[in-house]
Amino acid sequence: MVKQALYLDDLKVGDTFISGQYHLNADKIKKFAHEYDPQAFHCDENRAEDTFFKGLAASGWHTAAITMKLLTESLPFAHGVIGAGGEIEWPRPTRPNDVLHVKSTIKEIKPSKSKPNQALLFVECETFNQHNEVCQKLSAKLLSFRKR
Amino acid sequence: MVKQALYLDDLKVGDTFISGQYHLNADKIKKFAHEYDPQAFHCDENRAEDTFFKGLAASGWHTAAITMKLLTESLPFAHGVIGAGGEIEWPRPTRPNDVLHVKSTIKEIKPSKSKPNQALLFVECETFNQHNEVCQKLSAKLLSFRKR
């Protein structure tokens, strides 16, 4: 994992970053869910069986939070990973004992009109499980800054 | 807060739901950040001063998670609040001692072509702080089911 600080000047479309791994388990899924998404399919293995998810599944927002942790470790942007927003989808849920990692690709670099020292990066962040199935696809808008 | 289970048959475009309140504080911001978004501006009041955020700010994903908690309490959908994805933006950060609430409005109802008993709801979920400023705007795609 490269820890150098990358400025706008260092980045180009097509640049790709691979994160480390995150090991999910049932306890982590239930702990997050109790605090932020207390629904049966995220909180209780037994009650989850008869739901849409047919078994315990992590909250999509838990998957998003884990993805963010992996991004902070794998996107070595100067001034940090600062998001303005984006599009998110969850093609399949993350499950107990999934091992997740994120692949990020810079798709577009849009210089700011009002702030000449910064740009908006459009970064596609795909969160994979251990079977290389995509569990989350995030098209993130991230800030990038010029080296002054 | 109405706790009846609403099926697809009960919902129409324009329906609006107002959540209860969530009281944020610096400890909660830092706890979430240490686990999922460990960057200076989310973890440390002093170091946050010299950053883009000019002071401690919650992770956008923390705001999203809090929003989900408020949605689970305020959207009384049968079978739960199940998201397929959506668009998210954070026009301004949430801060220590903010009091948040969410207003959700059904913008579109799109019946599934392959599954006649379900539809995709396009729901605009705005997360406000105590000054009625929008801190997060989420255009969520949620599943809704017909009463069989």
Image (spheres, coloured by chain):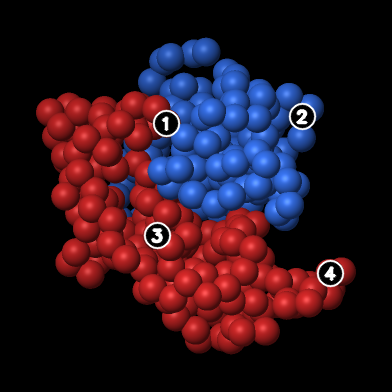
Chain colours: A red, B blue
Chain holding disc 2: B
What is the crowding at mark 3: few (fewer than 14 residues within 10 Å), some, or many (at least 20)?
many
Vertical placement of residue B85 versus A59, above or below: below
Residue on which disc 1 sits: A36
Earlier in the chain: of badge 3 and badge 4, it is 3
Residue on which disc 2 sits: B132
SS of the residue under disc 4: loop
Q: Amino acid at mark 4?
A: Lys
The picture places residue A136, in percent across and down from the top left corner, at 37, 59
Chain holding disc 1: A
Side (left or right) of B84 relative to B89: left
SS of the residue under disc 3: helix
Vertical placement of residue B4 versus A56, above or below: above
Residue on which disc 3 sits: A70
Q: Amino acid at mark 2?
A: Asn
**Distance of label 3 from label 4 (alpha carbons):** 29 Å
Q: Tell me the residue at 52%/36% (across/down).
A: B30
Residue on which disc 4 sits: A115
For the residues labelled 3 and 4, say whether their Cβ atoms are less than 8 Å apart: no
**Distance of label 2 from label 4 (alpha carbons):** 27 Å
For the residues labelled 1 and 3, say whether their Cβ atoms are less than 8 Å apart: no
Nearer the observer, disc 1 or disc 3?
A: 3
Q: Could you confirm whether marks 1 and 4 are on the same chain?
A: yes
